[in-house]
Amino acid sequence: MIERYLDYLSAIRRYSPRTIEIYRGVLEDFCIYSRRGELPPETSGDSAGPLPLPSEAGPSLLRSRGWLRFPEAVADAAKWLNVQTVRAYEVYLLDERKEGAKTVNLHLSVLSGFCKFLMKEGALESNPVRLVSRPKQEKRLPVFYREDAMRTYFEQTKGVLEFGKYEDQLQRMILGMLFATGLRRAELISLNRESVDLARRVLRVRGKGDKMREIPLPPVLCDEILLYLQAVDSLKYADRASEAPLLQTPRGERLYPVYVDRAVKAALAGIDGISGRKSPHVLRHTLATELLDGGADLNSIKELLGHSSLAATQVYTHNSIERLQSVYKSAHPRAKNDGNYGD
């Protein structure tokens, strides 16, 4: 049943392979936990005993013994997937595994989606996860870099696309694309040459849920893309087909997540005003914050970033309000003089 659900998420919902693996891990983890007190089935001579907790058991071994096949009959499914078991699992994650609220809520969300699927399949009568309270998550404001710090980076690397080594040209292109478009890392990696329409100055992006959107490209970025494509075409192993990756490793292969992460960290290392976490997602936060500060409306930013709801975009307003309050405290006469005007 788990495999059928994952196949459904992959084929129908178009979830990414990485997301599918996360879901698989959560469901197998719960499956092991919910059946931990039972005796294992035929084990080919192995000694019988209670199934260990997830932290003690290897999923590959348990999968090979048939322990990660979820029951399809209503009565059997409800035996392991009920309110009591889900609550106990939540306590186990929080108290024994010391997982954070974000991780626990992810597990519960995955289980809830699985329950809905089981209900559609007729294997479960109700969704027990709906009756389980979830731990509160601490709301964190998105981290972003200062505008002048990013300007410094792009000024320092201005001539790289014309005169630099290919690795440096690729690094500059990764930063330029991320900062100008607000792409997610996976979206950047999935871009093909045909994704770019330089005549219209737009980028066609396939985002979460297989949704397509078009992102406007600044003229300066269009010029940089042309320079970069010339650099790619000069590579010995370059893939020049229209469906080829837009951004390619020196061997003409598609980028991978670790490559992008390392490129961002290396590019931003040592830049004044850029401290803490250096990642593609922080560049996305930085663009959104700057657009909001520059007067862009939330709906436009939502469309640009590919958010499914306005609530996901509204979090950036808190950054702008905090910055405004900081300016107020440092510059407004009543803020500087304990609320009194004059000497």
Image (tube, rainbow, N blue to C red):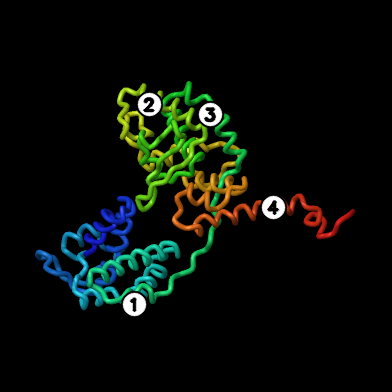
Which amino acid lies under the numbered mark 2 shown in the image of this protein?
Answer: Val
Near mark 4 (Cα within 10 A), the count class, few <14, some 14-19 or many ≥20, is: few
Real-space CA distance between mark 2 and mark 4, rounded to the nearest whole angstrom: 45 Å
**The disc label shown at residue 157, or none:** 3
Near mark 3 (Cα within 10 A), the count class, few <14, some 14-19 or many ≥20, is: some
| Mark closer to the chain start, 3 or 4 | 3
Q: Quadrant of residue 339?
A: bottom right
Report x, y in % for residue 59: 24, 59
Which amino acid lies under the numbered mark 4 shown in the image of this protein?
Answer: Ser
Near mark 2 (Cα within 10 A), the count class, few <14, some 14-19 or many ≥20, is: many
Which residue is identified by label 2?
Answer: 232
**The disc label shown at residue 326, or none:** 4
Which residue extends farthest front?
A: 200
Mark closer to the observer (3, 2): 2
Residue plotted at (52% across, 31% down)? 219
| Mark closer to the chain start, 1 or 2 | 1
**The disc label shown at residue 83, or none:** 1
**The disc label shown at residue 5, or none:** none
Real-space CA distance between mark 4 and mark 1, rounded to the nearest whole angstrom: 47 Å
* Callout 3: SS: loop
* Callout 4: SS: helix
Q: Is residue 150 left or right of residue 57?
A: right
Which amino acid lies under the numbered mark 3 shown in the image of this protein?
Answer: Thr
Real-space CA distance between mark 3 and mark 2, rounded to the nearest whole angstrom: 18 Å
| Mark closer to the chain start, 3 or 2 | 3
Evaluate if marks 1 and 3 touch, with contact meaning CB atoms under 8 Å apart: no
Near mark 1 (Cα within 10 A), the count class, few <14, some 14-19 or many ≥20, is: some
Q: Is residue 265 left or right of residue 329?
A: left
Report x, y in % for residue 88: 35, 75
Mark closer to the observer (2, 4): 2
Residue closer to the observer: 165 or 174: 174
Report x, y in % for residue 293: 62, 48
